[in-house]
Image: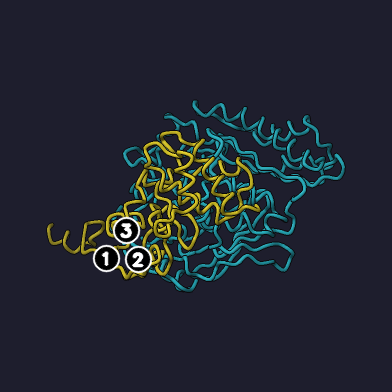
Amino acid sequence: MSSKVLTEPVGNVAVALPPLQRITLTINGAEKQLEVAPWTSLLDLLREYLDLTGTKKGCDHGQCGACTVLVDGKRINSCLTLAVMKDGCEITTVEGLSKGDQLHPVQEAFIEHDAFQCGYCTPGQICSAVGLINEGHAKTTDDIRELMSGNICRCGAYPGIVAAVEQALNVCQPNR
Amino acid sequence: MNSFSYTRAKEVDTAVREITQDKSAKFIAGGTNILDLMKENVERPDRLVDINRLPLQQVEGTTDGGLRLGALVSNADTAYHPEVVERYPLLSKTILAGASAQLRNMATDGGNLFQRTRCYYFYDTATPCNKREPGSGCSAINGYNRIHAILGTSEQCIATHPSDMCVALAALDAVVNVKGPSGERQIKFADFHRLPGNEPQYDNTVQAGEIVTSIDLPAEGFAKNYTYLKLRDRASYAFALVSVAVGLDLEGDTVKEARVALGGVAHKPWRKPEAEALLKGQKATKENFRKVADALLQGAKGFGSNTFKIELAHRAIVRALVMATEMKKK
């Protein structure tokens, strides 16, 4: 009996872990050579291995937007992205938006409009707003609401968030 | 999430070979659905084959005057592509009605076709589900089924297909190009997804080892009179309870051709050519639109919490046809 068990395929029993993957990412302007397990999400890589804890883990299922970062200038949910998939890409997190002490116009606008309460969703909101401005499809206030719908704010600071994004949009794209 | 190994394919043939050789391997493109399902232990692949570097990133014209969307073009790039906006505004509008800006930046056109149902019981590994575990039973039929299907259901499964994009592709009569171990073939969109029947574990008719390479849109895009009406629990970033994609070819007030596809009501985008044919040569009136709705919803069956969808769908079909008709007047 026992010998039969031994000759059967191992199936889903835990065995040796698959090898780590060697990747290169440029994170907030700095190139990093990294070794990651295939299942490490970009979010976990940033928070747990690189101590970039500005990016937040909310739902971890792509539903709340707290993990939003920019990959090659485009906003994505880092919780639903494997780090290995982004080998060779440029990642920008909330930590990489300011130029020294000079905050990004979106960050300035969030402070000016008091666009948060607890602040947990804020880094995702800010990165999402920067992505929205890069994309250039928001023309009206309603467009801002629609195109920011992937970022949930549990405190309900939406009026301030929309006002802040609108102000930043006017600063960055005055002729829209 | 289970542990898995990872490889990256650079050529379509390599990807096909890798997926054919390893039955427990899965493709990953945008990852927005499969990674979510892996976190829930619904999907447990031993290996992921990353297809993001395959040369399937082009949007280009076809010889018959249509447009070919590479399987790896993102949903966002498709929706905002100038030719899609101008010639296939129904597709653009439909894509933008789904998910969030972040997810549309990640999700690919090919991947969108393979989205799995958002049935709560399919996601909950503690409950029986014939789609996740064939033969275990359906928890939705006698459970909470507010988001579930009213058309084409079986005793095995009442799940719906969650995609918005696919509803427009169904209305437009798109064609899906696939490549497999035995070569290339084309699948008409109406035949791409399937009804659950006795094998609800199969969402579509793609065979093991096949990969979607592109989606072809025919020349006719119904760019003058179209609409996508999506009814859901909040104004943005929610799945459809009922959605209707309409494309009309009008001559004055007379309908030359009509396309009506429904989302949120079945295991696949729901179309019925005989219902659409009722409008051919007829006036674009509410009375005639009601006949189309009657025909489209013939045999609709509710399961308790979702019975409201029958009336909702009927009214949505009529409303969407009116909206599409009235576009020309603006």
Residue lying at 47% horizontally and 65% vertically, measured from the top left: B52
| Image quarter of residue B133 | top left
Chain identifier of the residue bearing label 3 in the image: A
Chain identifier of the residue bearing label 1 in the image: A
Type of amino acid at the residue the image marks with label 2: Tyr
Chain identifier of the residue bearing label 2 in the image: B
Type of amino acid at the residue the image marks with label 3: Leu
Type of amino acid at the residue the image marks with label 1: Pro
Q: Colour of chain A?
A: yellow
Residue receiving disc 2: B6
Q: Which quadrant of the figure contains the N terminus of chain A? A: bottom left
Q: Colour of chain B?
A: cyan
Q: Where residue B163 appears, x then y in whole percent?
A: 54, 47
Residue receiving disc 1: A18
Q: Give the mark nearest the N terminus, 1 or 3.
A: 1
Secondary structure beneath label 2: strand
Residue lying at 47% horizontally and 69% vertically, measured from the top left: B53
Q: Where residue B216 appears, x then y in whole percent?
A: 64, 61
Residue lying at 53% horizontally and 55% vertically, measured from the top left: B205
What is the C-alpha distance between the residues marked 2 and 3? 17 Å
Secondary structure beneath label 1: loop
What is the C-alpha distance between the residues marked 1 and 2? 8 Å
The disc label shown at residue B213, or none: none
Residue receiving disc 3: A45
